Image (cartoon, rainbow, N blue to C red):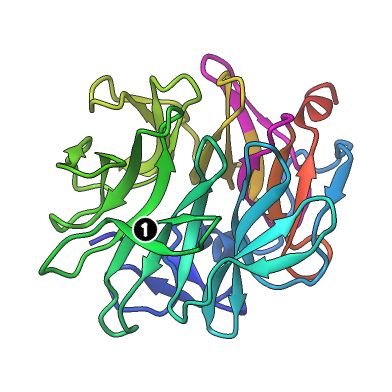
C-alpha cells in the first residue's frame, strides 16, 4: 500500500495510506510536520509580489486553474472531511462543487474546461475505497472513471492528457502505489511503473510526451519523468530534501514543485536541463504549486495565519 500522509485540521496530525481514513492522503504533508516554520537558507532575498486569492484561512490543498483562468478548484477542509470548492477568480465567490457527503479531492480541469477528474472516497471511512470520477460542470453528476471491482484499492491523483482522450493516475490495485494511464472512454489500464517505491502525483506535459511524478525509488522523494507508454524513466531532481507535487508550466519548459531542500517547504521551478529556483523564499509553509494560464504560479501558504491561495510571478523571482 502507499505510504503517503494526510494532514488534519491542525496541520500536525499524520495518517498513513495503508490505514483507513476519512480524508485524502497526500504525500507532501509529511513535510509540513518536518519543516514547521524553519527559516530557509536564502530567505534574506527579496520575495516577488504576491496576489492573495482567499482570506478565510481554512486548510486548503491542490488548487487547479481552469483553462480560461476564470475558476479555481481546490480541496478545503470542512470539519473533519475534505471537499472540493470552486472559486470565481473575478468575484472571489466560492461554492462547493458537489453535495456529496464523502471526501472528494485532487480535482483537475479537462483541457476544454467543461469537466473535471477527481478522487472520490465513495465508501465509509473504515472501508476506504477510493475511485477516480469524472464530473461535468453543467450537471455536477459524478461518473466513475477508474475503479477496482471486488477489492479495496485507491485510485487517485488523476491528470488529463492535453488532448483530453486519456488520463494518468495512481492505483494500489496490485498492492503498491503505481502509475497508470487509461482511456477516458474506458478500457484496459496501462501500467507505467512497477517498483516497491511510492509513485505519486502524476502531471502530464502540455505536449503530451512526458509525465512528471514524485517517487522515493532513489531514497528521498524526488521528481521523475516517464513517457506515457512507460518508457524512458529518468530523474529530474536530485536533492537532500523531499520534492513533490510536480506541475508543468503552460509552455512545457519548466516544472514547478514543492521542496524542503533548503530547510523549509517552498515552491521551486526547474527547467528540464537546468537548476531549480526557489520562487517563494518565505519562512512559512508554501505548498501545492499550480500554474495559471497566464504563467503565474498558484500555491497554498500559511504566511498570513491560516492556509490560503496565492499566486506569484515566478519570472520576477528569477531576476532577484
Image location (x, y in percent) of residue 71: 69, 50
- State which quadrant residue 283 falls in: bottom right
Image location (x, y in percent) of residue 97: 57, 66
| Camera-nearest residue between 70 and 120 | 70
Q: Residue at x 73, y 42 (%)?
A: 41
- State which quadrant residue 179 falls in: top left
Q: Going by the picture, which residue comes out furthest to the top? A: 273
- Tell me the quadrant of the picture where the N terminus can be found: bottom left
Say if 260 sits above or below 275 in the image: below
Q: Is residue 44 magenta?
A: no
Q: Is residue 4 visible?
A: no
Say if 161 sits above or below 21 in the image: above
Q: Secondary structure at mark 1?
A: strand
Q: Is residue 277 visible?
A: yes
Say if 308 sits above or below 256 in the image: below
Left/right placement of residue 105 relative to residue 194 reads right
Image location (x, y in percent) of residue 259: 57, 44
| Camera-nearest residue between 319 and 69 | 69
- State which quadrant residue 131 falls in: bottom left
Residue under label 1, please give it: 133
Q: Residue at x 52, y 18 (%)?
A: 272
- Tell me the quadrant of the picture where the C terminus can be found: top right
Label 1 Cα neighbours within 10 Å, binned few <14 / some 14-19 / many ≥20: many
Say if 143 sits above or below 40 in the image: below
Q: Residue at x 49, y 45 (%)?
A: 244
| Camera-nearest residue between 306 and 125 | 125
Q: Is residue 272 magenta?
A: yes
Image location (x, y in percent) of residue 34: 55, 62
Q: Residue at x 19, y 48 (%)?
A: 196
Q: The magenta stretch spans which residues?
A: 269-295
Amino acid at each position: 500500500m502507499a505510504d503517503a500522509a494526510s494532514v488534519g485540521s491542525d496541520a500536525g496530525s499524520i495518517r498513513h495510506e495503508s490505514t483507513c481514513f476519512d480524508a485524502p492522503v497526500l504525500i507532501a504533508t509529511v513535510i509540513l510536520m518536518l519543516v514547521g516554520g524553519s527559516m530557509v537558507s536564502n530567505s534574506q532575498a527579496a520575495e516577488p509580489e504576491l496576489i492573495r486569492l482567499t482570506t478565510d484561512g481554512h486548510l486548503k490543498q491542490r488548487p487547479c486553474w481552469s483553462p480560461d483562468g476564470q475558476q479555481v478548484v481546490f480541496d478545503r477542509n470542512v470539519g473533519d472531511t475534505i471537499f472540493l470548492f470552486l472559486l470565481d477568480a473575478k468575484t472571489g465567490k466560492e461554492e462547493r462543487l458537489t453535495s456529496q457527503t464523502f471526501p472528494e479531492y485532487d480535482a483537475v480541469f479537462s483541457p476544454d474546461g467543461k469537466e473535471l477528474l477527481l478522487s472520490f472516497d465513495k465508501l465509509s471511512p473504515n472501508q476506504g475505497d477510493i475511485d477516480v470520477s469524472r464530473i461535468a460542470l453543467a450537471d455536477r453528476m459524478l461518473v466513475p472513471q477508474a475503479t477496482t471491482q471486488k477489492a479495496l484499492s485507491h485510485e487517485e491523483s488523476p491528470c488529463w492528457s492535453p488532448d483530453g482522450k486519456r488520463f494518468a493516475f495512481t492505483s494500489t490495485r496490485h498492492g503498491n502505489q503505481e502509475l497508470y494511464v487509461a482511456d477516458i472512454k474506458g478500457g484496459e489500464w496501462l501500467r507505467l511503473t512497477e517498483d516497491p517505491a511510492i509513485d505519486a502525483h502524476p502531471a502530464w506535459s502540455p505536449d503530451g510526451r512526458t509525465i512528471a511524478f514524485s517517487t522515493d525509488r532513489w531514497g528521498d522523494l524526488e521528481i521523475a519523468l516517464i513517457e506515457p507508454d512507460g518508457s524512458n524513466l529518468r530523474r529530474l531532481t536530485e536533492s537532500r530534501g523531499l520534492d513533490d507535487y510536480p506541475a508543468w508550466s503552460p509552455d512545457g519548459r519548466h516544472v514547478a514543485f514543492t521542496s524542503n531542500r533548503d530547510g523549509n517547504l517552498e515552491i521551486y521551478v526547474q527547467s528540464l536541463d537546468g537548476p531549480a529556483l526557489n520562487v517563494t523564499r518565505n519562512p512559512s509553509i508554501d505548498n501545492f504549486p499550480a500554474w495559471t494560464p497566464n504563467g503565474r504560479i498558484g500555491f497554498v501558504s500559511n504566511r498570513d495565519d491560516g492556509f490560503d491561495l496565492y499566486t506569484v510571478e515566478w519570472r520576477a523571482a528569477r531576476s532577484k
